[in-house]
Amino acid sequence: MKTLTEFTALQIKNAAKTKQDLITAGKTPEELPQALGEALKIEGDKLNFLINALDLPMQKTSDLKRVIVMALGEGEQVPSNAAQKGEQVYVAEYYAPLHGATPPQKAGHGDRDSRGGRGGRGGPGRGKNDRRDQKGGGQGRGPRKDGAGPGAGPAKRPVITPKA
């Protein structure tokens, strides 16, 4: 397949609005292509492609990304998501749908219930040796030696006195 041209969603929406305005102004179907071309400053094949793209049955114009106009090569089949008008194939591309809007949650509470906290009663405690039998990290490097700890100052070194 060879891409002939493409129209963005904005171009399609503007052209649809202009077409509707021209119809309400009293333009006949015979005058409509020329008036639409003058209003949008498009002519030739591109105008014909745009008019055909406007006639396509589009389900959701709010999610429309673009419409691609392609020509089929010899022996190629029309894709399942495309519509054929004449010798051209029109493929409407859409943005991925947004999942249903979720209701706003309370600020800072997430999925917790109204009581908050870490869980209910009856569960195991959270003491030092609760996870002793589980694999993973260990007890660290062991207890501190020689009274070292935060704020203890430098470690004491033995004083060596020279012999006379």
Image: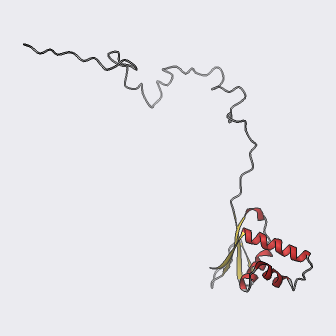
Q: Residue at x 80, y 79 (%)?
A: 39
Quick one: which residue is furthest to the left in this view?
A: 164
Quadrant, the C terminus: top left
Q: Check the image and report above or below for 125 versus 8.
A: above
Left or right: 90, with 135 as reference point: right
Q: Residue at x 37, y 17 (%)?
A: 152
Q: Position of residue 49 (x, y in %)?
A: 74, 80
Q: Position of residue 65 (x, y in %)?
A: 70, 66
**Residue nearer the viewer, 44 or 110:** 44
Q: How many discs mark residues in the rendered view?
A: 0
**Residue nearer the viewer, 135 or 54:** 54
Quick one: which residue is furthest to the top in this view?
A: 164
Left or right: 162, with 88 as reference point: left
Q: Check the image and report above or below for 44 versus 90.
A: below
Name which quarter of the figure residue 75 lies in: bottom right
Name which quarter of the figure residue 3 lies in: bottom right
**Residue nearer the viewer, 154 or 77:** 154
Q: Check the image and report above or below for 100 versus 149.
A: below
Left or right: 127, with 86 as reference point: left
Q: Position of residue 1 (x, y in %)?
A: 62, 79
Left or right: 161, with 26 as reference point: left
Name which quarter of the figure residue 156 lies in: top left
Q: Residue at x 81, y 80 (%)?
A: 36
Q: Check the image and report above or below for 163 versus 81.
A: above
Question: What colour scheme was applied to this rendering of the protein?
Answer: secondary structure
